[in-house]
Amino acid sequence: GGHVGSDPVVPRLEREALLSGHTGCVNCVSYSKEGGLLVSGSDDRSLMVWHPLEHSHLATIETPHTGNIFSAKFMPHSSNRLVVSSAADGRVVVSDISRGVAIKAGNPTHSGSCYKVRVEESQPSLILSCGEDGFLQAHDIRAGGEAPKVLYSARNAKAPPSTGAGDEGGWGSSRKTVCALDINPVQSHIVSLGGSDGVTRTLDLRMGSSQLG
């Protein structure tokens, strides 16, 4: 019994830095590839970029998001100049840190919140996003105002085996949300999604929206 925090084998971590600046809950943090910079996104709809080891603030971007920011990532091969973010407004936004402004900010493409964005290392102009509407979308930032391509829809996904627990907590609900997303760093055509139905699905993008498991 007892709480994990009171366990004598749990080490006491020394606080390295307090990076204060947001005026709302911080929902996401992400390091640059080499670890020298950190970006944070918040309910205040701003992005902040930090030198975490130097305990210093580099930039603040007042994004055009109209809802809480849930995900933010440095764009590969941009010399840590570009950050992509997604938010409760269903939008995917690309911001330029050096200029402190958004440079790609179209209309919302997800109906409901956009929970995660990811960018594959070998295709830095291609952004993947997932959201409350159950879609996995691909956004090509070179395509101007072109609508994103829907790669996967949770609405068409095979339902998980019944647990016999009814429909409590959204399990087995007709409303299917894609809450989590990541790209395999070795095989970039492999993408995994986490759903509100309690299932993790792995997709091969070479096969369209074919489900591997």
Image (cartoon, rainbow, N blue to C red):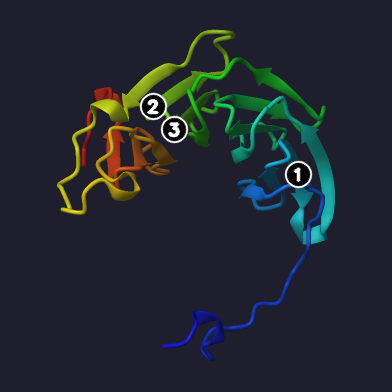
Q: Quadrant of the C terminus?
A: top left
Residue receiving disc 3: 132
Q: Residue 196 location in percent, x, y?
A: 35, 43
Q: Nearer the viewer, mark 2 or mark 3?
A: 3
Residue 181 can be seen, yes or no: no
Residue 213 can be seen, yes or no: yes
Q: Nearer the viewer, mark 2 or mark 1?
A: 2
Given the image, on which type of amino acid does mark 2 rest?
Answer: Phe
Q: Residue 182 location in percent, x, y?
A: 43, 42
Residue plotted at (76% across, 60% down):
53
**Helix, strand or loop at mark 3:** loop
Q: Are marks 1 and 3 in contact (CB under 8 Å)?
A: no
Residue plotted at (81% across, 31% down):
98
Foreground pick, 153 / 185: 153
Given the image, on which type of amino acid does mark 1 rest?
Answer: Val
Given the image, on which type of amino acid does mark 3 rest?
Answer: Glu
Q: Residue 181 location in percent, x, y?
A: 42, 40
First in sequence, mark 2 or 1: give its number.
1
Q: Residues within 10 Å of mark 3 (few under 14, many from 20)?
A: many
Label annotation for residue 135: 2
| As drawn, 7 above or below 157 | below
Residue receiving disc 1: 49
Q: CA distance from mark 2 to mark 3?
A: 8 Å
Left or right, residue 128 beside residue 74: left
